[in-house]
Image (cartoon, rainbow, N blue to C red):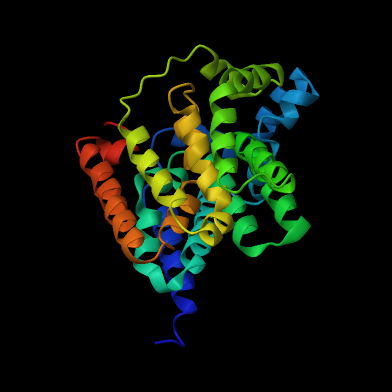
Amino acid sequence: MRRLEPFWPLIFASIYAYFLAFIMPLDVFKDREHYLDYATEPGLSMLDYWLQGFLPVLFNEPLFLIVNYVPGLFLSGPAVLEALIFSFSFLGAYCVLSSNPRLLVWMVLILLLPQVLKNYVMQLRQGYALSLFLYGWFFCRGVNRWLVIAMAPFLHASFFIVLAFMVAYQSFTFLRIRYWLVPLLIGAIAASSTFLIIEVASLLGVRQGERYANAVVHVSGKAFVFWFVVFCIFMAQSKSWVVRHGLEISFVAMYLGLYFMSPLAGRVFESVLPLVLIAGLSLQGRSFLIFASMFLIYFFGHYFLASREVLFGVGVAL
């Protein structure tokens, strides 16, 4: 069994990617026609942004357009989409599964969580960026890690925000601020930077800027309570655990800070959700049992709430 253990992530990642790319029909998911247009004529979008100026080109996910354009030179639109979904979902799944093969079943549940799964069937930009981000996180070190992670925002703009908070975290640790205070500062910055984020996005010509500029935040508070409890569990761990997973804890603090202030909170948090869950599953003893129980409630609760929607909220009503 131990000899086969390194191959399980490879096997499961292949099955996961093959199912999403080649078994699931292309036309049943929201925005799929939109992505087929990108796969068929990415050059038109590139030209449209170029006519608006250099900044709109740079900050409107140019890498996403490139990864559509290059295979489009050899493949048809649907084939481009299938190839990209397979390659990026395989990469993302392999990164998650190989992060802790001993907890393979839990890693599979992370991949099947609606917030993660929809990145590879509906929000494809974010799924591609997430896979690249996970690869940089788990398989790169030093400068290379930052270079790979820095490419993710050019696939999906939400990672500009993630990267900004990562830089803030590294700055605080460089200044040797107390380890328990850093996540609190990240949360405070998130709460106070909401309007600045949207304003900067609009000035840079980011296409999401206009969408969120006048958006109203409608939240029930349930998710805030859930993740606040998780945050407290994380912060109650030993100093070595908190230091080792300081960034993941700070991502939770970032979400809590944005929750009541910004419509971007959930979308940005989805970009780092797998890392937060993987960190939680590394807990030991009673803390692991509590977190694992909460995760199962979170997992099945989302499927229950979405059970009346078409394909759990990612499908197109016929």
Instruction: Indicate left or right for 128 with 7 as reference.
Output: right
Residue 235 in the image, given as x and y percentages of width and height: 46, 49
Quarter of the image for the N terminus: give it.
bottom left
Picture quadrant where residue 83 is located: bottom right
Judged from this view, the residue extending furthest toward the right is: 54
Q: Is residue 181 above or below residue 206?
A: below
Instruction: Indicate left or right for 318 with 59 as reference.
Output: left
Q: Nearer the viewer, residue 113 or 72?
A: 113
The structure residue drawn at horizontal position 31% and vertical position 62%, both measured from the top left corner, is 286
The structure residue drawn at horizontal position 70% and vertical position 23%, both measured from the top left corner, is 48
Residue 81 in the image, given as x and y percentages of width and height: 53, 47
Instruction: Indicate left or right for 58 with 285 as reference.
Output: right
Residue 23 visible in the shown view: no
Q: Is residue 29 above or below residue 25?
A: above
Residue 18 in the image, given as x and y percentages of width and height: 43, 61
Quarter of the image for the C terminus: give it.
top left
Q: Nearer the viewer, residue 212 or 48?
A: 212
The structure residue drawn at horizontal position 35% and vertical position 59%, both measured from the top left corner, is 287
